[in-house]
Image (cartoon, grey):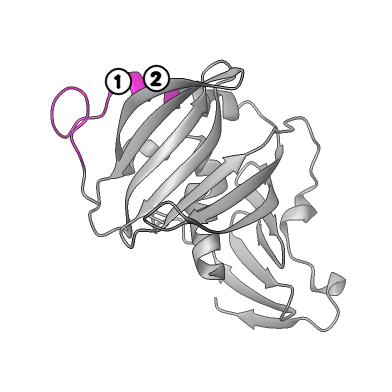
Amino acid sequence: MKRNIIASLILAMAVCQAAAQPTKGSLGKSDPDAKKILDAVSAKFKTYKAVNAPFTLKIANAAGKEQGSKSGTVQMKGVKYKISLDGQEIFCDGKTVWTFDKGANEVQISNLDKGSGSITPQKLFTNFYDKDFLYKLNEEKKVGAKIIQYIELTPIDKSKPFFKVIVEVDKSAKNLVATTVFEKSGNRYTYSVGSMKTSADIPDAAFIFDPKKYPGVEVIDLR
């Protein structure tokens, strides 16, 4: 379960990596209306100096029955990020990833594989969609006081473990509010983002695991 949750966060956030489906217009091409929306979300996100936001991750089976949920926070600054969950934290300084299991008091260290096609939290909010997905604008609905636009993405690489991603965008704010990943196994992972604080001054040290702050921690270096 932990591995699935973390994979979904870093894909969906999120963050993971399907048969490409037809979009509006000709087969094999993405919907220009969807691109305009995604580009606007990306452009706005790039203006933020740093981001601190709460999130909720819900896991459901193919029938839509909820199997569990997790809540946490994500911090992002440039290429750096930190994900905090109950019992687990992930630190990344843009080069190295530390995955800390609180229950086991264990941290695994690995290199960030920039060429793997994995989606970091930052990539979810920027232009990750351009090379790896086809996308189309499905619909928009009023949810509470917001107008939400739903964009469907399908991976170009059919070997990926999921076949579809639904991205939800606040039409007025031009912010991503939720992402649902549909795995080939039938599981669905929905990542919802709360109100983002975009003016916080987050020190670079916040994205580096400091073993001195975790007495007795077992370090497993996988680099």
Q: Residue at left 63%, top 82%?
A: 220
Q: Secondary structure at mark 1?
A: helix
Q: Which mark is residue 89?
A: none
Residue 22 forms part of the magenta stretch: yes
**x, y percentage for residue 130?**
35, 35
* Three-letter amino acid code at the position of disc 1: Pro
* Residue at which label 1 appears: 32
Decide which of 30, 151 is in the foreground and name it: 151
The amino acid type, in three-letter code, at marker 2 is Lys
Q: Residue at x 71, y 37 (%)?
A: 50
Count of numbered circles on the image? 2
Q: Name the quarter where the C terminus is drawn.
A: bottom right
**Marks 2 and 1 in Cβ contact (< 8 Å):** yes
**Chief SS of the magenta region:** loop
Which residue is at the front of the view, 61 or 196? 61
Q: Who is closer to the viewer here, 4 or 91?
A: 4
Question: How far is disc 2 from disc 1 in space, using C-alphas?
Answer: 6 Å
Image height of 155 relative to 111, above or below: above
Q: Residue at x 21, y 24 (%)?
A: 24
Q: Which residue is mark 2?
A: 36
Q: Residues within 10 Å of mark 1 (few under 14, many from 20)?
A: some
From the viewer's perspective, is residue 87 above or below residue 28? below
Q: Which residues are magenta?
A: 21-38
Q: Which quadrant of the figure has residue 55? A: top right
Position in image of residue 45 (x %, y %): 58, 29
| Residue 183 location (% of width, % of height) | 36, 56
Circle 2 SS class: helix
Instruction: Categorize mark 2 by other alpha carbons within 10 Å: few (<14), some (14-19), many (20+).
Output: few
Residue at screen point 33% across, 18% down? 33
Q: Is residue 127 visible?
A: no
